[in-house]
Image: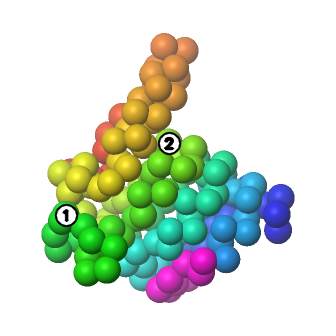
């Protein structure tokens, strides 16, 4: 499994991603669409090669963007934004708004990395969606 690059676990009624996900060190694409997730484990940030993460139609939302590790943890840990190569994140169909996502710790690092990579694609002639993760 250490060579696995793409994993599609969509539509499996998954309520939690196990911390052992960090053992999939070669993973570049992870599809967790249409499950019952409300958050992700910090260990997901250990997937240094992760570029694409799809979380469409789960139950990820926040009641407040005043995050605290003990009382109000961020549902997508900062390590996912800061410590991976993530450039494509789809959160369509969750209870998040783009304004809330912009308040997530580490999200600015994700946006900067995404902009650098996507700008290269734009200048190379490819059409690129620069929307904010499928959110309004």
In this orientation, does residue 91 appear?
A: yes
Q: Quarter holding the N terminus?
A: bottom right
Q: What residue is drawn where x is 29% and y is 56%?
A: 104
Q: Residue at x 57, y 68 (%)?
A: 43
- Residue receiving disc 1: 65
Q: Secondary structure at mark 2?
A: loop
Where's residue 69, x and y in %?
33, 73
Which contiguous range is marked in magenta? 12-19
Report if residue 61 is visible in the image: no
Is 63 placed left or right of 38 in the picture? Answer: left
Between residue 23 and residue 123, name the one nearer to us.
23
Left or right relative to 6: residue 13: left
- Where does the image place residue 90, in percent across and percent down from the top left? 42, 55
- Quarter-wise, where is residue 128 in the image? top left
Q: Are marks 2 and 1 in contact (CB under 8 Å)?
A: no
Residue at the disc numbered 2: 87
């Amino acid at each position: 499994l250490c060579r696995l690059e793409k994993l599609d676990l969509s539509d499996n009624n998954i309520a939690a991603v196990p911390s052992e996900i960090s053992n999939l060190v070669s993973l570049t694409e992870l599809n967790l669409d249409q499950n019952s997730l409300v958050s992700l484990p910090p260990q997901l940030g250990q997937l240094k090669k992760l570029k694409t993460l799809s979380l469409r139609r789960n139950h990820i939302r926040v009641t407040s963007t005043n995050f605290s590790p003990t009382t109000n943890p961020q549902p997508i840990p900062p390590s996912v934004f800061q410590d991976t190569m993530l450039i494509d994140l789809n959160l369509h169909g969750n209870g998040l708004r783009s304004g809330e996502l912009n308040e997530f710790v580490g999200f600015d690092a994700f946006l900067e990395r995404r902009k650098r990579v996507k700008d290269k694609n734009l200048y190379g002639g490819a059409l690129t969606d620069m929307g904010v993760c499928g959110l309004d």
